């Protein structure tokens, strides 16, 4: 039970990091805001 919870939070963290990285990349290129929602 605890292990599953830890694994789930780990997945969420990794996903958040990926989103942050892609977000920074998107911001550096400065496209329309819709591009960010499409990648999510």
Image (cartoon, grey):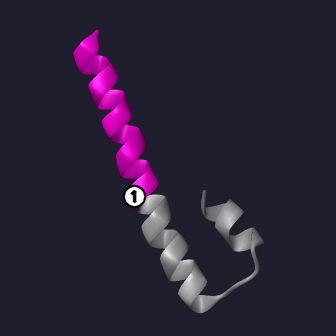
Q: Is residue 32 left or right of residue 6?
A: right
Return the residue at label 1: 17
Residue 10 in the image: state x and y as whole percent.
31, 38
Kindly identify the residue that appears in the image at 43 percent across and 70 percent down. 21
Give the side of residue 30 with respect to residue 21, left or right.
right
Frontmost residue, 38 versus 20: 20
Residue farthest to the top? 1
Q: Is residue 12 above or below residue 3?
A: below
Q: Tell me, yes or no, whether the highlighted magenta stretch contains residue 7.
A: yes
Q: Quadrant of the C terminus?
A: bottom right
Q: At numbered mark 1, what does the secondary structure look like: helix, strand or loop?
A: helix
Vertical side of 14 occupied by 29: above or below: below
* 30 falls in the magenta region: no
Say which residue appears at 35% left-offset and 49% top-offset: 14
Q: In the image, residue 27 lies at what x, y percent?
A: 59, 82
Query: What crowding class fits label 1: few (fewer than 14 Cα within 10 Å), some (14-19), or many (20 or more)?
Result: few
Please identify the residue farthest to the bottom as the structure is shown.
29
Quadrant of residue 32 within the rendered picture: bottom right
Q: Is residue 22 above or below residue 3?
A: below
The image quadrant of residue 13 is: top left
Which residue lies at the image location 28% right of the left edge and 9% below the top edge? 1
Q: Which residues are magenta?
A: 1-17
Name the residue: 66% across, 68% down: 36
Most common SS among magenta residues: helix
Q: For residue 17, what is the image quadrant?
A: bottom left
Of all residues, the one furthest to the left in this rendering is 3
Does 14 sit above or below residue 29?
Answer: above
Q: Is residue 20 left or right of residue 31?
A: left
């Amino acid at each position: 039970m605890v292990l599953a919870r830890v694994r789930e939070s780990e997945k969420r963290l990794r996903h958040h990091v990926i989103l942050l990285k892609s977000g920074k990349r998107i911001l550096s290129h400065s496209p329309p805001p819709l591009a960010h929602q499409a990648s999510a």
